[in-house]
Image: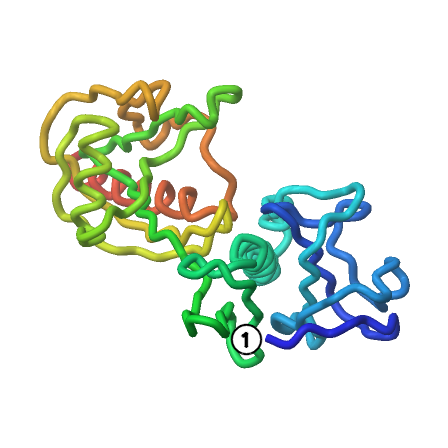
């Protein structure tokens, strides 16, 4: 899309992004005239609209207050999605300055999110990595695990992983569950999805039922995993995540199982 050199009078929301980080002065996304935030003269691209105002992307690192877009996730889902778009587009443009085939400097398309090579005429688009995430029920218990990335805090969540080349989403669910916990699942069904800009994922949520096996965790991925009764859960992810949605959906099914069998 077309870049715009800011005169200072432009107004809207300002997503200043670099290397997966978002500029959050005073902990918030800047909103107002460009000159209020010292953005005059910078290159900006409109990437959407929020609450009737233009959302601008500036792919540049600021000297301070660069933070994870996770901070925005708890404020509003729509704003978080736009922040994720900004972060991912900024990283796409940063990593596609030159053509991967011929090495020629590329330019940004004026009509779509793409980088164009005028030498060999290749066209590059932002890549999205599909990931599965799954809540697994065994009667009135849910499988929760502590991941290596959460080893510094006691957060437990459902299993997740990237989809591999040539496999369906359902196959990815079965494979990831087997690799990480050594159990089999059945009745795999889709629930919902969530764009997740860490760094450029699309999380696709599923529910599944236990089908056999004993838990044996993959120590490279998990610290621990266990079955938890729906009334006795450890610390779980916040409500703005698809992981929490899957846990809550599974808890409903666990409670229903309990009611049907007592």
Q: Nearer the viewer, residue 244 or 161?
A: 161
Q: How is the image coloured?
A: rainbow
Q: Considering the numbered disc 1 on the image, is that residue within a helix, a strand or a loop?
A: loop
Q: Is 83 on the left-hand or right-hand side of 223?
A: right
Quadrant for the C terminus, please.
top left
Is residue 247 visible in the rendered image? The answer is yes
Residue 54 placement, left or right of 178: right
Closest to the observer, 252 or 96: 96
- Give how far across and how far down residue 89 sits, in percent: 56, 60
Outermost residue on the bottom side: it is 111
The vertical placement of 62 against 109, above or below, is above
Residue 198 lies, in percent from the top left, at 49, 45
> Who's the residue at 47% across and 26% down the image?
150
**Mark 1 crowd level (few <14, some 14–19, many ≥20, 10 Å Cα):** some
User: Above or below — where is 70 with respect to 94?
Assistant: above
Residue at the image point whose x is 77% and y is 48% from the top: 62
Quadrant in the picture for residue 11: bottom right
Where residue 67 sits, quadrant-wise, is top right
> Would residue 93 be found to the left or right of residue 226 on screen?
right
- Asked if residue 77 can be seen in this view, the reply is no
Point 72% across, 48% down: residue: 61
Q: Looking at the picture, does residue 43 appear above or below residue 9? A: above
Q: How many marks?
A: 1
Residue hosting label 1: 109
Q: Residue at left 73%, top 74%? A: 4
Instruction: Give the residue at the far left of this rendering.
Output: 212
Which quadrant of the figure has residue 183?
top left
Q: Position of residue 3 (x, y in %)?
A: 68, 73
Residue 184 at what x, y percent from top left? 13, 34
Of residue 76 and residue 258, the one placed in the foreground of this image is 76
Which image quadrant: the N terminus?
bottom right
């Amino acid at each position: 899309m077309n870049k715009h050199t800011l005169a200072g009078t432009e107004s809207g929301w300002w997503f200043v992004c670099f290397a997966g980080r978002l500029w959050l002065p005073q902990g918030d996304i800047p909103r107002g005239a460009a000159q209020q935030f010292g953005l005059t003269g910078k290159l900006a691209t409109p990437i959407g609209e929020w609450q009737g105002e233009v959302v601008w992307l500036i792919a540049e690192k600021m000297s301070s207050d660069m933070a994870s877009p996770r901070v925005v996730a708890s404020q509003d889902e729509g704003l978080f999605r736009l922040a994720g778009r900004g972060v991912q587009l900024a990283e796409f443009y940063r990593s596609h300055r030159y053509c991967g085939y011929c090495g020629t400097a590329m330019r940004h398309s004026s009509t779509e999110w793409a980088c164009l090579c005028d030498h060999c005429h290749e066209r590059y688009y932002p890549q999205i990595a599909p990931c599965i995430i799954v809540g697994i029920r065994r009667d009135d218990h849910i499988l929760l695990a502590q991941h290596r990335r959460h080893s510094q805090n006691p957060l437990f969540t459902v299993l997740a992983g990237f989809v591999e080349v040539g496999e369906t989403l359902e196959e990815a669910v079965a494979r990831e569950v087997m690799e990480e916990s050594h159990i089999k699942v059945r009745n795999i069904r889709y629930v919902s999805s969530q764009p997740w800009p860490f760094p450029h994922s699309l999380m696709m949520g599923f529910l599944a039922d236990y089908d056999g096996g004993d838990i044996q965790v993959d120590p490279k991925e998990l610290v621990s995993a266990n079955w938890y009764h729906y009334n006795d859960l450890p610390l779980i992810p916040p409500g703005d995540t698809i992981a929490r949605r899957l846990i809550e959906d599974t808890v409903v099914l666990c409670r229903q199982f309990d009611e049907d069998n007592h």
